[in-house]
Amino acid sequence: MRRGFTLIELLVVIAIISVLASILFPVFARARSKARGTACQSNMRQLGIALQMYADDADEIMPLWSLVGGSPTGGAPSAYPYTWDEQVFPYYRNKQVLECPENPLGRGFRSYAMPRYVSGIQLGRFPNPVATVALFEKGMYPFGIWDDATGENVYQSHTAKGQPGYSEVPFHHEGKNFTFIDGHVKWYTKGAGPFAACYRAGAEPGACEVPARPPSGDWPPAG
């Protein structure tokens, strides 16, 4: 004689499935986020290599963040900007490399910016290439757009303070990835890392606009 489930047995099974789901879903979400963070690091390594290749072909000079220049808060220029991502494009040749999978705006947006203090600088001038940031996670505009192709302080790199469409929480596990002049990529938690230091008197932590070594500039001193 065939016997089906009782209502109590069915409810117990549903309860067990619910408990397992509540335990496993956060694990899956963390694993997915970690995978996206790893993909972002891969993007930034490729871009770091592209920057080095560009510099090798340009007398060891880093690309300018924009051929037009100007202040990133002064409004878009009238001339075509030709930003760093366009200048370096022949060396990476895939615009998807510019997209962090965890950019809160989604796909189609350049997710990385170049600090102003490395723009157009010869590689040999950096006193500490291992600690000098070449690219960091910041971006809410597409490829080639002048706005936010650069950045100059910690608020633009760790909390995205003041940027429409961005959360105050960083992208990856309460932190972000950074590419350094020597090409390596590393993740730092919010409030730590390369933009937590202040090297110039009168500057705020994370300032990266004056291209010189301390105490007159913002480059990290020789280690």
Image (spheres, grey):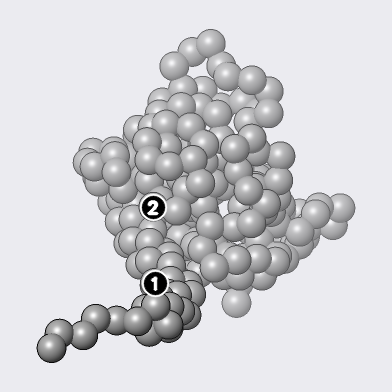
- For the residues labelled 1 and 2, the Cα–Cα distance comes to 16 Å
Residue 162 in view (yes/no): yes
Q: Residue at x 48, y 32 (%)?
A: 141
| Residue type, mark 2 in image | Pro
Q: Which numbered disc, 1 or 2, marks the residue closer to the eye?
A: 1
For disc 2, the marked residue is 101
In the displayed orientation, state which residue is furthest to the bottom. 1
Dot label at residue 28: 1
Image x and y of residue 175, in percent: 58, 65
Image x and y of residue 98, in percent: 36, 45
Quadrant of image for the C terminus = bottom right
Q: Quadrant for residue 41, please give it.
A: bottom left
In the displayed orientation, state which residue is furthest to the left. 1
Of residues 25 and 57, the one nearer the viewer is 25
Report crowding for label 2: few under 14, some 14 to 19, many 20 or more residues within 10 A (C-alpha).
Answer: many
Residue 131 in view (yes/no): no
Dot label at residue 87: none
The correct choice, above or below, for 124 with respect to 188 in the image is above
Numbered disc 1: secondary structure: helix
Q: Is residue 188 left or right of residue 30?
A: right
The correct choice, above or below, for 43 with respect to 175 in the image is above
Quadrant of image for the N terminus = bottom left
Q: Which residue is drawn at 46% across and 22% down?
A: 81
Q: Earlier in the sequence, mark 1 or mark 2?
A: 1
Of residues 40 and 8, the one nearer the viewer is 8
